[in-house]
Amino acid sequence: MSNKSPRPVECGHVPLQARNVSFAWEDTPLHWVPGDPFATHTINVLHMLLPAGERWFVHVYKQVLPLIRDERLRADVVGFIGQEAVHSQAHDEVLPHLRKLGLDPTPYTAQVDWFFEKLLGDRTLPPGRARRWWLLERVALIAAIEHYTAFLGDWVLNAGELDRRGADPTMLDLLRWHGAEEVEHRSVAFDLFLHVDGGYARRVRTWATAFTAIVFLWQRGARFFMANDPTLHEGRARLRDFHIAGRRGTLPTTGAMLRSVPRYLSRGYHPSQEGSTAQALAYLASSPAASAAEREGR
Amino acid sequence: MRTPGLRTAVAVAGAALLARRALRRRIEDSPLWPLPALDPPTSGRPRSRALRLLVTAHRTVADGVVQLRLAGERLPTWEPGAHLDVVLPSGLVRQYSLCGDPADTSSYTIAARLVAGGRGGSRELHEQVVEGMELEVRGPRNRFPLVAADSYVFVAGGIGITPILPMLRAVPDGVEWRLLYCGRTRASMPFLTELAGDERVTVVAEDTDGRPDLGALPVPAGAAVYCCGPEGLTAAVEERFPAVRLERFAPLADTGEDRPFELELRRSGRTLTVAADTSVLAAVRAELPDTPYSCAQGFCGTCQQRVLEGEVAHRDELLTDTERADSMLICVSRARSGRLVLDM
């Protein structure tokens, strides 16, 4: 039951290219959404998941290059790999700063490292069918995860409430530069999945795995940060706080998250129907970090 | 329908309640149960991180030379010979050798000469950077490390004294060293007062003493020779002491011509020639089209490959010194000598 019919709705093709950004964290406070440790830490979970997660994307995609028979898709995947590699490095650089502020994320990140490097790693498989099956399974997992990174990218580009609450400008630039690149390359992972396999059963199966893993790791990360924040007494993360933050606009709403589920599972789904490339490129043109990288020609 | 469910429902609800209580107790005991941790962890140890440092001193220490003190907290440590990448206000990135005390983790000291007709970086550092300003830096990184040797000979030309200065202090007691410090005029040579009175230092100023005589420099057997200075001086020293360790002012990419070299790909059993105007990556892709790469500018790290033999001229801005010992980014780096062997 393969599903290769959906066509992109936007046809303007943007060549993907990694941007060599850098961020200095000295001035960023622990609660960079002022007075809102829960929203801060829920978003901070990204810094713990993405370094290992996006390194894993790169690791998997390096292996899938020989399976690509379409030159344009290959160019997209090549650009995608570089963007993901830089995302992973950029989020990794936040972690020493959190440690300096008294919130050492290592107990949690070491588990995320295990999750991506061992559990989802190459495994001890002989060359041949089993290896190929596991590679395709991971390509499909990445396509499902990218549905959510594009969703979050689109959310953060439009999260005006964070600006109104005076969130730290460096952190906002990191999140929006990253979010904009996720929106920019949102179709690549899904197109690659369609190109190498595209089976609907696999799409559903890997979506369920990815969604469960994301929810499990995210709530656990938020609880870890709230419990270990040195400035909070008995800090806790509750589901109720998430609904409240969503209504306030400092996190995505629960409804929007749930509505994105059937969209990915619909047979007519294509990522180009989500988010706006024009908005992403407009942000990248004005982002302090991305435009500094542009100026240096790097 | 008889009440098939009632007893079952009670049993299921009871079991669920028990399970929930057990799970909750387990999580309270150890909140990150049950995932194992990777040992050693990989995340949270970035290769380098950008630092925003405060310029707390900006003073002229010789004709056309300014010295800057950049203050921060718990700065990464460095070894003599290391440099910083400094992001200037315009966005230009320039490298400056660290010339302060490696034990000081609250500030970095750099010095720079104003280059007339240079690429603009030194003018900006002299004229637009002022005390109280914040500068973004990356590093430190060391491409010019001090290796253990029986004795040392240092040759510095003008501002080339900056990486040498911390080396002099780091040479262990009892190990002999000599420094030949040349410049145009004494007034233009920084740090003369700090070096004055040491009989191991020979100062040669061109306007009074003429050109330095490298032939007269005594170099004992087993000595390591270090040189940092303008192109003319480094070339002269390299001619006389081919084993010299050099630090050039301009990055290698801007000096010296790219030369063709032989490249062996050992695992796939191929040998090819990398022409002067192509990158290793382009040459390899012609043979192995599925070679991973992405940015092609030396920052994303996708094309990193293991080096089995040959010396590499590293031109990337990503790899750490340890990674550079046995790998390279094939998109920008080349062979230093005539041959390179990669594990691919």
Image (spheres, rainbow, N blue to C red):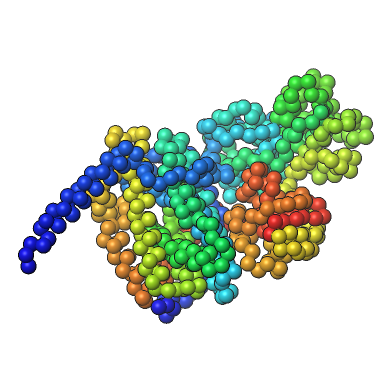
Residue B295, located in which quarter of the rendered image?
A: bottom right
| Residue situated in front as seen by the camera: A80 or B31 | B31
Where B81 falls versus A153 (above or below)? above
Toward the top, the furthest residue is: B197
What residue is shown at x 40% (from left), y 69% (from top)?
A203
Measured as percent of width and height from the top left, residue A258 is found at 29, 62
Q: Is residue B342 visible?
A: yes
Residue B9, located in which quarter of the rendered image?
A: bottom left
What residue is shown at x 47% (from left), y 73% (from top)?
A197
| Residue situated in front as seen by the camera: A186 or A266 | A266
Measured as percent of width and height from the top left, residue B149 is found at 79, 31
Measured as percent of width and height from the top left, residue B341 is found at 75, 55
Toward the right, the furthest residue is: B215
Where A116 falls versus B276 (above or below)? above
Toward the left, the furthest residue is: B2
What residue is shown at x 37% (from left), y 43% (from top)?
B32
Image check: A281 left or right of B284? left
Q: Is residue B56 visible?
A: no
Image check: A144 left or right of A292? left
Q: Dividing the image into 4 quarters, which one contains the C terminus of chain B?
A: bottom right
